[in-house]
């Protein structure tokens, strides 16, 4: 089988991801990108492990936190009132709604997701968000992160949380991020990356694709793509303990992947949580 990231297989990869996340949104499947754990309280536990505070989580619409994070790009972004923000792969609205509170009524947040079921879930959460916060500054648009439904140079900050891994064309994603950012704008991204190449059988697993693992590339490949796109003031930071914690929590997706690894190897030997801060001059 070809590498999932080759352009000829791009649409197949997107459909695999789309169907997997549709199942998550409809409750037919529990595990996915940095997936939801077997314990019902785990999405909140995971979020707090990543630095989201309990008070903020309590203000989110019910079901917005689906346990899909591998970092905290909202905190990294240091959002300010009045900013325009786009959230790539916005899911149920977890980061988008938090961003909405931070940019206040004078700001605007646009969530983009390619899965209609996720979009429906997020849009239904808007009424609850407005009731909780008194704000009407978040919207959700259907679209692929490789082709964002947003005008050129119109956004102050781009957020993404464990999503770019899923794209079969990461260079195009970063070109789009660069296109939509205003001069001086910032990308704040949490993702998964590789410390060394994954065995081919792991890359071929559909569970790995939907789990943000099969589409991951090397940390230095990520750096090269972002620099090539034209970003400056680039900072990449790794969190090697994140994937190990997923294994310690006995997540079924990670257990399935781990049993297919070479003898004596752990998933944390290959995969790391990565934060990316990059500015458009």
Image (spheres, rainbow, N blue to C red):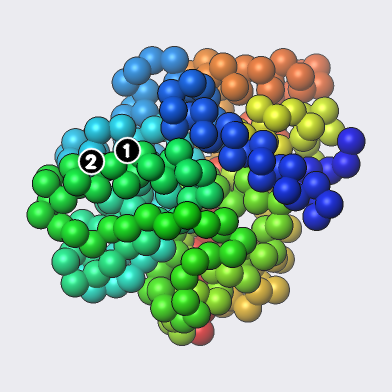
Inspect this view and state whether residue 248 appears: no
The residue at which mark 2 appears reads as 60
Q: Residue at x 44, y 15 (%)?
A: 38
Q: Residue at x 65, y 51 (%)?
A: 167
Secondary structure type for disc 1: loop
Q: What is the x, y in percent for residue 139?
A: 32, 58
Q: Residue at x 37, y 61 (%)?
A: 110
The residue at which mark 1 appears reads as 64
Q: Residue at x 19, y 59 (%)?
A: 136
Closer to us: 235 or 228:
228
Q: Quadrant of residue 18?
A: top right
Q: What is the x, y in percent for residue 111?
A: 40, 56
Secondary structure type for disc 2: loop
Dots 2, 1 in contact, CB < 8 A: yes
Horizontally, residue 60 falls left or right of residue 10, namely left
Above or below residue 237? Residue 208 is: above
Horizontally, residue 200 falls left or right of residue 57, namely right
Above or below residue 35? Residue 251 is: above
Q: What is the x, y in percent for residue 55?
A: 17, 39
């Amino acid at each position: 089988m070809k590498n999932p990231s080759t352009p000829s297989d791009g649409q197949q990869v997107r459909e695999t991801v789309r169907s997997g996340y549709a199942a998550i949104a409809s409750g037919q499947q529990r595990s996915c990108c940095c997936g939801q754990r077997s314990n019902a309280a785990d999405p909140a536990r995971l979020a707090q492990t990543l630095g989201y505070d309990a008070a903020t989580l309590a203000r989110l619409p019910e079901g917005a936190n689906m346990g899909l994070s591998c970092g905290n790009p909202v905190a990294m972004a240091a959002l300010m009132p009045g900013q325009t923000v786009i959230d790539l792969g916005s899911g149920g609205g977890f980061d988008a709604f938090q961003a909405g509170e931070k940019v206040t009524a004078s700001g605007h947040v646009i969530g983009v997701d390619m899965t209609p079921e996720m979009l429906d879930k997020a849009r239904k959460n808007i009424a609850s968000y407005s009731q909780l916060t008194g704000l009407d500054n978040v919207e959700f648009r259907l679209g692929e992160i490789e082709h964002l439904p947003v005008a050129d140079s119109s956004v102050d900050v781009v957020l993404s949380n464990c999503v770019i891994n899923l794209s079969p064309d990461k260079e195009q994603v970063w070109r789009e991020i660069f296109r939509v950012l205003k001069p001086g704008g910032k990308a704040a991204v949490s993702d998964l990356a590789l410390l060394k190449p994954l065995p081919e059988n792991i890359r071929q697993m559909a569970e790995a694709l939907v789990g943000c693992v099969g589409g991951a590339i090397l940390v230095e490949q990520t750096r090269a793509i972002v620099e090539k796109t034209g970003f400056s003031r680039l900072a990449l930071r790794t969190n090697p303990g994140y994937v190990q914690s997923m294994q310690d929590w006995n997540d079924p997706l990670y257990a399935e992947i781990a049993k297919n690894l070479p003898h004596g190897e752990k998933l944390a030997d290959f995969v790391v949580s990565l934060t990316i801060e990059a500015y458009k001059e």
